[in-house]
Image (cartoon, grey):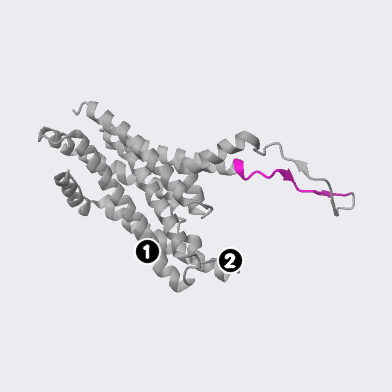
Amino acid sequence: MNNLLSANLMRLKKSWIFWGTVVLMAGLGCFFAVMQKKALENGVEASLERGLFQFVAVIGIMAAVFCAIFVGTEYSDGTIRNKVIAGYDRLAIYLSMLVTCSMATAVLCLICMLCYTMLGAVLVGWFTLGPAQLLGLGAAVLVLVVCFSSMFTLIAMLCHNKAASAVACILVALLLLFIGSHINTKLEEPKTYGGYLMDETGAFQEADPTPNPAYVAGTTRKVYEFLFDVTPGGQQMQLSSMACDQPWHFAGYSAVITVMITACGSFAFRKKDLK
């Protein structure tokens, strides 16, 4: 396992996709810092922590691209097949790839947050939230990234075609983001419509609020709220906007999903016929 990890990390240092995504995430962090500065200049309430986790909305796509290409190159170069022939256990091979992808995508997050904080501190000022809150949110983000890495590692390890696995990973990332956005839209539906009515003269007058038929209530709302907290896409929506009161719950949900996906992926990889 240690030898496999060392080999993966050595290849990671020379990986163009890794350094390309590092530069992209660094630029993204600087961009969000500048946007916070512009918001402050326009009279909009802004603070350093408001943009710290905005990158979470796109981190699933970044992880999908990186994992698919990095793992796919192992197949196209015949490296995975050679590792099996050399006598390495398939579980160790799978886990070493998962750990490498998780470490790489976690580094992408840290690079983005570091660049944002360094530039944002100069442009906007320092954090107003306490360290415990920031650490809790940061931990939830990192565990979520590991969860994404486990999904895309599974797809990339079971699909030997690099192009096909890249497309599949990106589609899954977009689907999860769409699900989170859809649930968020449903939960944000107002219970009633505004209580104003336009009279014959064109003036607005108060009127009784009209019930909103699209409002989600009762058991259905509880199900939506649960899915919003559990699904990676729902967590993306909440963490990117910092609308999260209990980030440690998010970390727990992501950890459970990661374990389940890793168990399924490693079992399937053991049975896979490596051509």
Where in the figure is residue 206, as x and y percent of width and height?
Answer: 84, 51
Q: In this view of the protein, which residue sits in the foreground, 15 or 219?
A: 219
Q: Measure the C-alpha gap from mark 1 to mark 2.
A: 22 Å
* Amino acid type at mark 1: Leu
Marking on residue 114: 1
Of residues 251 and 235, the one drawn nearer to the viewer in this rendering: 251
Q: Position of residue 254 (x, y in %)?
A: 41, 43
Q: Which residues are magenta?
A: 186-199
Q: Secondary structure at mark 1?
A: helix
Residue 272 shows in this picture: no
Q: Number of labelled discs?
A: 2
| Few, some or many residues within 10 Å of mark 2 (<14, 14–19, 20+) | few
Q: Residue at x 22, y 35 (%)?
A: 91
Circle 2 is placed at which residue position? 45
Q: Earlier in the sequence, mark 1 or mark 2?
A: 2
Front residue of 87/10: it is 87
Q: Amino acid at mark 2?
A: Glu
Which quadrant holds residue 164? top left
Q: Residue at x 43, y 56 (%)?
A: 136
> Which quadrant of the rendered structure holds the C terminus?
top left
> Measuring 44% from the left and 52% from the top, which residue is drawn there?
56
Residue 129 painted magenta: no
Is there any visible trace of residue 199 in the rendered image?
yes
